[in-house]
């Protein structure tokens, strides 16, 4: 019971650490959000931004990381 809880707390802490690093260093990454395929429509009084390619890239990286984690377990 306790080792499972400890593992879950360590994983949650690691995920929070990674999220914090992404939020801290994210604005300084020049390519994130400006990739080809990210749609930006700006008109007077209207702004639409769809980061399609950025979302696909993040999804691919997370899928790869989780796949590697499952193989190394």
Image (spheres, rainbow, N blue to C red):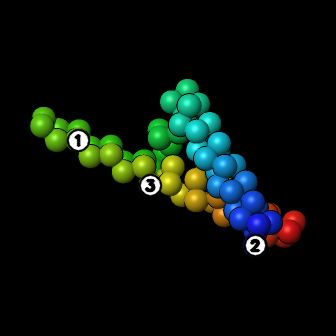
Q: Looking at this rendering, what residue extends furthest in the bottom direction? A: 1
Question: To which quarter of the image does residue 6 belong?
Answer: bottom right
The image's mark for residue 1 is 2
Q: Which residue bears the numbered disc 3?
A: 52
Residue 17 can be seen, yes or no:
yes
Disc 1 or 3, which lies upstream in sequence?
Answer: 1
Residue 5 pos. (x, y %) = 71, 65
Tell me the SS state at disc 3: helix
For the residues carrying marks 3 and 2, which lies nearer the camera in this image? 2
Residue 64 pos. (x, y %) = 72, 61
Residue 66 can be seen, yes or no:
no
Residue 57 pos. (x, y %) = 58, 53
Q: Residue at x 12, y 37 (%)?
A: 45
Give the vertical position of 71 relative to 13 (above or below). below
Q: Are marks 2 and 1 in contact (CB under 8 Å)?
A: no
Tell me the SS state at disc 2: loop
């Amino acid at each position: 019971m306790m080792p499972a809880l400890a593992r879950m707390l360590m994983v949650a802490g690691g995920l929070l650490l990674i999220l914090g690093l992404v939020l801290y260093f994210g604005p300084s990454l020049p390519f994130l959000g400006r990739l080809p395929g990210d749609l930006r429509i700006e008109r007077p009084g209207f702004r639409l931004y769809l980061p399609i390619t950025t979302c696909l890239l993040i999804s691919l990286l997370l899928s790869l990381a989780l796949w590697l984690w499952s193989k190394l377990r």
